[in-house]
Image (spheres, grey):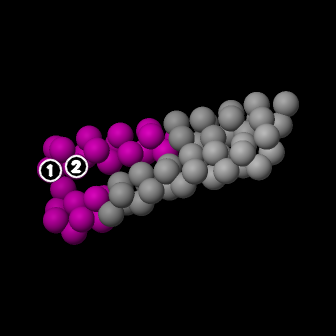
Amino acid sequence: MNVLIDVLEVVGTLLIGFAALRVHHRVLNEHKIGKRVFRAMKREQRLGILGMVLIVAGFILEIGYKG
């Protein structure tokens, strides 16, 4: 049961992260913002991707540890 809870938590977190990154991606592609905002959004997008990778890595380590 704990594994199911962990899986659901990771999937939910990743879905939230994915949704946020899609919004940033759409705004970045439209280029209707200033350079300063554009740079900040690019940085946030990279941090969001890194965060999602870390979530998956932590999940894999946790499953390996519990398994």
Residue 19, quarter of the rendered image? top left
- The correct choice, above or below, for 62 with respect to 15 in the image is below
**Residue type marked 1:** His
Q: Which residues are magenta?
A: 16-42
- The correct choice, above or below, for 5 with respect to 41 in the image is above
Label 1, residues with CA under 10 Å away: few <14, some 14-19, many ≥20? few
Residue 34, quarter of the rendered image? bottom left
Read off the residue under disc 2: 28
What residue is at 76 percent from the left and 31 percent from the top?
4
**Residue type marked 2:** Leu
Q: Per the image, is 31 magenta?
A: yes
The numbered dot on residue 14 is: none
| In-image side of 4 versus 43 (left or right) | right
Which quadrant: the C terminus?
Answer: top right
Find residue 49 and report its horizontal and vertical position in percent.
Answer: 42, 52
Label 2: state its secondary structure.
helix
Whole-angstrom CA distance, mark 1 to mark 2, is 5 Å
The numbered dot on residue 31 is: 1
Q: Per the image, is 20 magenta?
A: yes
- The correct choice, above or below, for 29 with respect to 34 in the image is above
- Residue 38 in sight here: yes
| In-image side of 15 versus 38 (left or right) | right
**Labelled pair 1, 2 in contact (Cβ < 8 Å):** yes
- The correct choice, above or below, for 50 with respect to 30 in the image is below
Find residue 39 and report its horizontal and vertical position in percent.
Answer: 24, 65
